[in-house]
Image: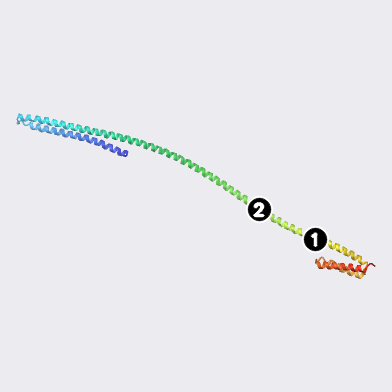
């Protein structure tokens, strides 16, 4: 398929060919006219001398008619050639016009395709601009979300530190309460020990009271010296008993009391 420049070059060449054909025809006609003129001139030159006989001048007339006939034939041939060249030029001109029309149609189609492509490019540019705006909005939204997330993380860290401080405080309080509980348990054990000691002291008091009652009762029976000895020994055992909380001392004190009561009963009243 020829481009517009090549088509113009081809059309110009064809037109130049037509002009060259016409030029050839003209040169051909000029050549034949020159030839016929030359022949006429030569025949005239031949008839010019007056020394020639009248018969020779009459012979030059048929040759002139023959040259005119030849010239007419040549002119007819030149006309036919010119007509053929003209028809060829017309055909070439028609082909050139058809080619120009086809090229114009192709140019129009190319212009339409270029316009459609430009519209598509404009649409793509609009879409690109819209995507750019959406990207900017997305970036702004992402930055806002990141800021909110950072604020929430900072707040959560602050809450965590506050809770850790509260947990540490509660642990300290728990330790204090545990210490107080241990102290309360120790005090409870001390109270129980004191109650037990008080109970033992009450029991000892009751036994001492019973022993002193028996001694007072036996003092009326035993001699004065023996009664004093028993009382001194019983007092010594009673005073030593809180220091020695052993079963042996308790048993020995009970035996001494029983011995004193038995001796008092053995002596009898009076």
Residue 121 drawn above or below residue 234: above
Name above or below for residue 5 compared with residue 212: above
| Residue found at x 66% / y 53% | 167
**In the image, is 38 to the left or to the right of 247?**
left
User: What residue is shown with label 1?
Assistant: 196
Q: How is the image coloured?
A: rainbow
Left or right: 69 in relation to 13: left
Q: Is residue 192 visible?
A: yes
Residue 221 location (% of width, % of height): 93, 67
Residue 200 falls in which quadrant of the image?
bottom right
Which mark sits nearer the N-terminus, 2 or 1? Answer: 2
User: Measured from the top left, where is residue 248 in percent x and y?
Assistant: 81, 68
Q: Can residue 240 be seen in this view?
A: no
**Crowd around label 2: few <14 · some 14–19 · many ≥20 (10 Å):** few
Of the 4 image quadrants, the one containing the C terminus is bottom right
Under tag 1, what secondary structure? helix
The mark lying in front, picked from 2 and 1, is: 1
In this rendered view, identify the residue nearer to me: 255 or 236.
255
Q: Position of residue 100 (x, y in %)?
A: 31, 35
Among the 4 quarters of the image, the one containing residue 15: top left
Residue at image position (28%, 38%) is 10
Q: Quick check: 60 left or right of 116?
A: left
Which quarter of the figure has residue 51?
Answer: top left
Q: Quadrant of the N terminus?
A: top left
Going by the image, does 143 lie left or right of 163? left
Most foreground residue, 121 or 1: 1
- CA gap between label 2 and label 1 equals 42 Å
Q: Identify the residue at horizontal 88%, vertical 63% (top origin).
A: 210
Q: Considering the numbered disc 2 on the image, is that residue within a helix, a strand or a loop?
A: helix
How many numbered badges does the structure rendering display? 2
Residue 167's label in the rendered image is: 2
Which residue is found at the position 18% from the left and 34% from the top?
A: 28
């Amino acid at each position: 398929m020829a481009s517009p420049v090549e088509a113009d070059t081809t059309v110009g060449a064809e037109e130049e060919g037509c002009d060259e054909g016409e030029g050839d025809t003209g040169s051909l006609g000029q050549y034949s006219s020159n030839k016929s003129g030359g022949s006429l001139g030569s025949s005239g030159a031949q008839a010019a001398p007056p020394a020639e006989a009248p018969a020779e001048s009459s012979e030059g007339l048929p040759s002139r008619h023959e040259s005119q006939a030849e010239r007419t034939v040549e002119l007819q041939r030149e006309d036919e050639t010119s007509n053929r060249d003209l028809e060829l030029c017309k055909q070439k001109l028609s082909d050139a016009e058809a080619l120009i029309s086809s090229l114009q149609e192709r140019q129009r189609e190319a212009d339409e395709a270029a316009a459609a492509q430009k519209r598509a490019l404009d649409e793509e540019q609009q879409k690109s601009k819209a995507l750019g705006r959406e990207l900017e909005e997305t970036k702004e939204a992402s930055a806002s979300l990141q800021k909110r997330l950072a604020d929430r993380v900072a707040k959560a860290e602050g809450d965590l530190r506050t809770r850790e401080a509260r947990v540490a405080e509660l642990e300290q309080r728990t330790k204090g309460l545990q210490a107080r509980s241990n102290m309360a348990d120790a005090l409870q054990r001390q109270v129980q020990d004191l109650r037990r000691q008080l109970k033992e002291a009450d029991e000892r008091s009751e036994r001492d009271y019973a022993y002193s009652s028996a001694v007072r009762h036996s003092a009326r029976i035993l001699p004065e010296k023996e009664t004093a000895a028993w009382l001194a020994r019983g007092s010594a055992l009673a005073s030593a008993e809180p220091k020695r909380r052993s079963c042996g001392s308790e048993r020995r004190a009970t035996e001494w009391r029983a011995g004193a009561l038995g001796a008092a009963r053995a002596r009898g009243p009076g």
